Amino acid sequence: MILLQVIAGGLLLGAVYALFSAGLTLIWGMMNFINFAHGEFVMLGMYAALLTVTWVGGGPGVFGFAAALALFLLGVLIYFSLIKQVMRGPMLAQILSTFGLALLLRYAAFWIFSPNFVTLPTTVLSGTVDLGGILLTVPQLVAGSVAAGLGLGMHLLLTRTAVGSELLAVAEDRNAAMLMGIRPDRMQALAWGLSAASAGIAGALMAISFPFSPAVGETFALTAFVVVTLGGFGSVPGAMLAGLIVGLIQALSAYWFGPIYKDVVVYGLFVALLWLRPQGLLGKA
């Protein structure tokens, strides 16, 4: 029964990984652009949740929406003020721009919030739920369930709506999309907004259960890159599947070998899989 509880917890955590990693792979799939500041978006979502709870109060529905909205606007702003310009330059400029952006956001957060770890008030969500003998904390269950639902919603948005068709059209051929009356800049700005919003709300959900500081973005960025590469760059379904796998492997590794070894096992299996299948699980060869 304990093993089933560990597996359930790993899958719920993996759903959150899948949500913020899907945003990273969306940008790559549309623009062939790697956002090194994606982990900082997750960190800002955590602080957006903290500020919302402190100033306004409310539960996950309130601070999750606030984090998603704030990060969506930030993503659109970053696209028009930075990304649109550096896209015209060499690849090195594109890489360094978001790397510099990550440092800017991280140290701005250090200056504003201090380097100390903080947590959301314990009154936000508490307690446990018994699901047929499997005990899960309420924060864990809420975060994983909401993340899974939002991840499915993003997939449906991309595959079942007119907006998703326009996003995919720009990703396939920007010039052809323009001839069809689609405005690529608007779609790419929307993609950056959605990517940042998914990271922001994932951060808000993670903040329910974990303490955080401005430095956590680096850890989340590394996790996102592992998930995206494992799933296949540009594949949103691949990122979702890989997120669940990474969360499950971390949980089982911590259970069997100890918490300090969970990342070692993940990265070891990650390297082994890429040696056998470099394009990732659902990526194109």
Image (spheres, rainbow, N blue to C red):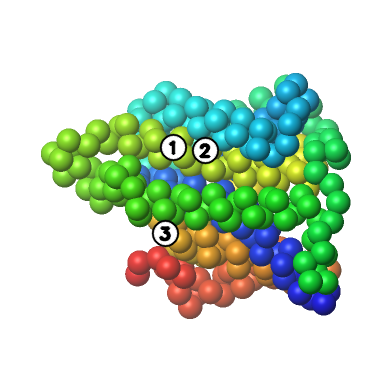
| Quadrant including the N terminus | bottom right
The answer to which of marks 2 and 3 sits earlier in the sequence is 2
Q: Quadrant of residue 44?
A: top right
Q: Residue furthest left?
A: 179
Identify which residue, 201 or 189, lies in the foreground: 201
Q: Are marks 1 and 3 in contact (CB under 8 Å)?
A: no
Image-based side of 163 in relation to 254, left or right: left
| Amino acid marked by disc 1 | Trp
Residue 70 visible in the shown view: yes
The residue located at (51%, 28%) in the rendering is: 74
Residue 223 in view: no
The residue singled out by tag 1 in the image is 192
What's the amino acid at mark 2? Ala
Q: Amino acid at mark 3?
A: Ser
> Element at badge 2?
helix
* Residue 119, image x, y percentages: 82, 38
Residue pictured at 25% horizontal, 48% vertical: 169
Cα distance in 3D space between marks 1 and 3: 16 Å
The local secondary structure at tag 3 comes to: loop
Image mark for residue 235: 3
Instruction: Tell me the number on the disc at residue 196.
Output: 2
* Neighbour tally class for label 2: few under 14, some 14-19, many 20 plus, Cα within 10 Å: many
